[in-house]
Amino acid sequence: RRSRESHTMIFSLLATLIAYLVGSLSFAVIVSRAMGLSDPRTYGSGNPGATNVLRSGSKPAAIVTLLLDAAKGWLPVMLVKWFGPAWDLSEGTQALAGRAACRGHLYPVFFAFKGGKGVATAVGVLLAFQPLLALATLLTFAIIVFFWRYVSLASMVAAVFAPAYYLIGDGVAWTASGAKTLALIAMGLLLIWRHRENIQRLLAGTESKLGQKKK
């Protein structure tokens, strides 16, 4: 039994490490290079994310970046869901994998630990946790963007509401998991921390709105 538990712990750590490495793939930079665009870290907000790639004028590049950034949050969690039971990997490992993927995006080992804000990757994790959770969070994001046109504000509001939605859904569409709830809270706090400069610009009234080119 102890051998089984040891193997479970090793596979849990391995899944977490792989999730971090997958999250460390900065697709904003990779896609931009592949499509012959400027490095997104050299213009606009300097943030390697889909929103800044959009400022390059290439919507296809921004869409591909968005989808791949979301996929790298979704895939590690789903791999644990699909193959984890054979090694007694629980929802706790799913939560660890989700957090690790987001942390990889924020602090990518392949790109000098300078990553993006983590919004798309977090959405991918939510989708893997529970599709209805992702839908509710995306609707919240869309509503804020529609009325105020601030992607940063919408991201932070959605990050606050995501764990609340997860808890509200207990007994309705899914069973609340303590590990996943803590993961959602940790991811949300990290996301807000990464938006601290945006918060300052929002308070100063200088934050760029969606569709507005940043100087």
Image (cartoon, grey):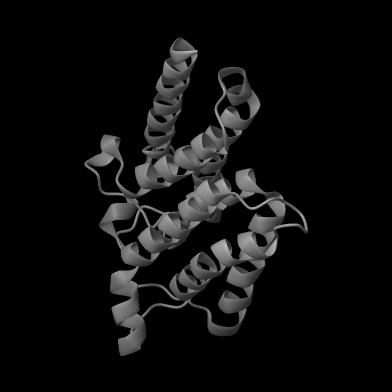
Which residue corresponds to the image point at 28% horizontal and 35% vertical from the top-left?
A: 110
**32 to 176, vertically: above or below:** above
* Towards the viewer: 174 or 27: 174
Q: Is residue 162 above or below residue 202?
A: above
Considering every residue shown, the one lying at the far left of the view is: 112
Residue farthest to the right, as pictured: 172
Q: Nearer the viewer, residue 138 or 52?
A: 138
Q: Residue at x 41, y 17 (%)?
A: 6
State which quarter of the image contains the C terminus. bottom left
Where, by quadrant of the figure, is residue 90 drawn? Answer: top right
Residue displayed at 54% across by 83% down? 148
Q: Can residue 61 be seen in this snapshot?
A: no
Residue 132 in percent (x, y) is at 72, 56
Is the residue 31 above or below the residue 158 in the image? Answer: above
Most distant residue in the front direction: 1
Number of residue marks: 0
Residue at 43%, 41% in the rendered image: 101
Q: Nearer the viewer, residue 94 or 4?
A: 4
Provide residue 77's location: percent of width, then percent of height.
55, 36
Residue 170 appears in the figure = yes
83 shown above or below 198: above
- Horizontal arrangement in the rendering, residue 43 relative to residue 30 (left or right): left
Residue 65 percent location from the top left of the image? 49, 47
Q: Quadrant of residue 135?
A: bottom right
Residue 69: percent from the left, percent from the top? 49, 45
Query: Is 112 placed left or right of 37 in the picture?
Result: left
Q: State left or right for residue 28 relative to residue 93.
A: left
